Amino acid sequence: MDSHCGLLAAWTVLNYFGERPSVAALEKACRHTRRHGVFTIGLAAALAQYGLGVAFHSRKDSHRHPIEVRLYRRALRLGVALLPATSLRQLVTAIDEDHVPIVFYNTRDNVGHFSPLLGARRGRLLLPNTVEGTVAVAEFERGWRQPGILQQAIVVTRLPNKRLERTAEKRGRSIAGR
């Protein structure tokens, strides 16, 4: 499938958080098209649809495609936080807080690419959806700041399951009350 890296990044993060969507369901949730692949905001909305907490970071996009306009509205309805672009340092720090970022950047071949960001080590970023599994920080920064890329990133976290929390609280009270 062409333009599969966005779907693969979303699938990888969903699996990390215990979700196992089918390819067809994920394509539909991300609003994947053969012509455009996926837009970053489409990935963000899909991840929120699966019940995850999602923050979408981007510089101002003054050239939104009509599909993106609809995806932004959908993302807001699903509770996606729309935030200004963030720094690479903040994204790497977020990983330590049990958050998983997905980044969008231009590769050295000038192709837009999505990958989860798993950390940084010795001047390289751990990006599993790349051929080598790592990219030099300087190379990534160049590709992430190029026109049209907009320094976009999605930060995903598991939302607390209120039902499970209430059940645990009830169990705790019933045990304590005995």
Image (cartoon, rainbow, N blue to C red):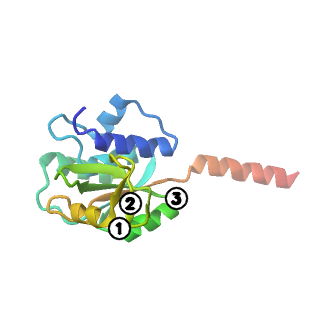
Image quadrant where residue 152 sits: bottom left
In the picture, measured across the screen, residue 122 lies left or right of residue 38, that is right
In the picture, measured across the screen, residue 166 lies left or right of residue 83, that is right
Which circle's residue, 1 or 2, is located before the other in the chain?
1
Q: Crowdedness of circle 3 by 10 Å Cα count: few (<14), some, many (20+)?
A: few
Residue 81: % across, % down = 35, 60
175, above or below 150, in the image: above
Looking at the rendered structure, the kind of residue marked 1 is Leu
Which circle's residue, 3 or 2, is located before the other in the chain?
3
Give the distance between the C-alpha atoms of the residues marked 3 and 2, in whole angstroms. Answer: 17 Å
Kindly give the residue lying farthest to the left in the view shown. 63
At 15% from the left edge and 59% from the top edge, which residue is drawn? 148
On-image quarter of the N terminus: top left
- Please tell me whether mark 3 or mark 1 is closer to you in this view: 1
Mark 2, secondary structure of its residue: strand
Numbered tag placed on residue 98 in the rendering: 3
Give the distance between the C-alpha atoms of the residues marked 1 and 2, in whole angstroms. Answer: 10 Å
Residue 81 visible at all: no
Numbered tag placed on residue 125 in the rendering: 2
Numbered tag placed on residue 50 in the rendering: none
Look at the numbered discs 1 and 2 and tell me whether their residues touch, using CB distance below 8 Å.
yes
33, above or below 145, in the image: above
Q: Crowdedness of circle 2 by 10 Å Cα count: few (<14), some, many (20+)?
A: many
Mark 3, secondary structure of its residue: loop
- Please tell me whether mark 1 or mark 2 is closer to you in this view: 2
Looking at the rendered structure, the kind of residue marked 3 is Asp
Nearer the observer, 136 or 33: 136
> What residue did someone put label 1 on?
88
Residue 80: % across, % down = 35, 55
Residue 30: % across, % down = 30, 41
